[in-house]
Amino acid sequence: MTLPGRLLPWFRRLPVVTRLVLAVAITMSLVLTGAAGFVYWRVKTALDQQLDDDLTTYQRSLDHAVRNRAQLPPGPRGSLQQVLDAHGRVLDSSDAVRHQILLTPDELDSVARGATVRHDVGSLLPITSDTLRLQAHHVMAGGRRRIVIAAVRRGHRDEALRELLAQLATASGLTLIAASYVGYRTARAALRPVERYRSGAATLADGTQNLRLDVPTDRDDEITRLGHTLNHMLDRLQASADRERRFVADASHELRTPLTLMRAELDVALHRPRSTGELTETLRSVDAEVQRLIDLSNALLGLEELGSTGHVTRAPAGLADLIDAAVTPHRRTAERAGRDLTVDSTDVVVDIDSRWLRPAVSNLVDNAMRHGHGSVRVEATVHEGVLSVCVTDEGPGFPPEFLPRVFDRFARAEASRTSDGSGLGLAFVHAVATAHGGTAHADNAGHGAAVTLRLPC
């Protein structure tokens, strides 16, 4: 339904229930008007046809009497007759009209030229008396032109149409009222859950925790699905809020430690005069803590960028070159520690986001170098459109109780709480896997830990 330009802003400002009721009322009005108009037209056509048939029959009997110079026959009840000569003078007429000519001068001219004239006298509304339908044409009687006028009263026909209009108006009005009432009740019933959901959301906005909407379980309609969607959204918001609180608490703790150490180093250095060697050692210690802060900040920024958008840009990349670029920065560390770092990679092209996968693999190698022992092996294969990157070491592996939360942010086994690292490396790997639509899995395999990254490629 299209509203005029000026009414549309006003209509949109109305409550939803009011708009629905107005839409139902306007639509039903149009439908009822069309139906009533069709019924009225059909009945009027039938009544007019009957009236025209009576008028034609009466006209023929008058024509026959005029041609034979016989007495004019009586017509239907309330009918009128009139015979005029070629100049419009009344030759014979019903008593009701006497010398009143029923035709206008223009109509007389039309009949004289051979046309047949038919028209109504009086109107349906407002009610008037002596409503007629007349028909006139000329006939030849004894070589002379005569104008014969036949008229029948429309009283019964008009009364029937007026009664029909009254009945249609009454029926349409009652139907419109009933339809509007039903539309109002239906709209109210349909929107009642929405109002309940709105009230619940307002309660949540006031600070209420763990709020869930009361959604019926015995139906499956649009409103019910909306309720389930809102509850799912509330679950995600609650989980997000919980993660945010944990993140803030853990980040505060992780940032506080290097800052406290830096402050302590500087306080000791400023407490009394120091030698050049002592100052150099202090600066190196502060530099290490600053680098730790930088690494932590970069890890946090990378996680937040990947987690907030969840968007990766896939592009073809050589798997062997990508793995080599991720492992190469760790080879010198492995040489200094006297450990083997081996790579077994399939030389294929994969469709992934190298910007995120390269640091993820690098984090896996770094984690194995920091917390594992012995040889570190990186194996990258592609099977049935899935890229699998597995990094294993020969260390003590993950504590069994730590495996369920190995990919949580700032999660570290108790034994490694004092070791290097921020506890964000595996969390970043899991975020990269999720963004690619893949998985990350950690387990203890043989004599060490194994972390596997699987991505569709």
Image (cartoon, grey):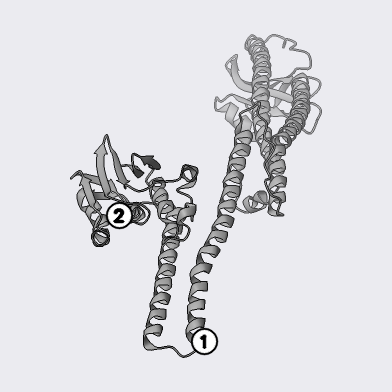
Indicate the amino acid at tag 1: His
Residue 18, position as x, y percentages in the image: 72, 43
Q: Specify whether residue 18 is in view.
A: yes
Residue 24, disc: none
User: Residue 197, located in which quarter of the rendered image?
Assistant: top right
Residue 22, position as x, y percentages in the image: 70, 40
Residue 147, position as x, y percentages in the image: 64, 22
Residue that numbered label 1 is attached to: 271
Report helix, strand or loop for mark 1. helix
* Residue at x 52% of width, y 62% of height: 251
Tell me the crowding category of disc 2: few under 14, some 14 to 19, or many 20 or more residues within 10 angstroms, Cα based.
some
Residue 457, position as x, y percentages in the image: 29, 42
Please state if 351 lies on the left or on the right of 87 as rendered.
Answer: left
167 or 294: which is nearer to us?
294
Residue that numbered label 2 is attached to: 358
The relative height of residue 66 versus residue 438 in the rendered view (above or below) is above
Task: Quadrant for the N terminus, please.
Answer: top right
Please state if 291 lies on the left or on the right of 200 as rendered.
Answer: left
Q: Specify whether residue 88 is in view.
A: no
Q: Earlier in the sequence, mark 1 or mark 2?
A: 1
Question: Residue extending furthest left?
Answer: 347
* Label 1, label 2: how far apart the Cα atoms are: 45 Å
Indicate the amino acid at tag 2: Arg
Please state if 391 lies on the left or on the right of 405 as rendered.
Answer: left
Pair 1/2: label in front: 1
276 or 193: which is nearer to us?
276
Tell me the crowding category of disc 1: few under 14, some 14 to 19, or many 20 or more residues within 10 angstroms, Cα based.
few
189 or 456: which is nearer to us?
456
* Residue at x 39% of width, y 41% of height: 443
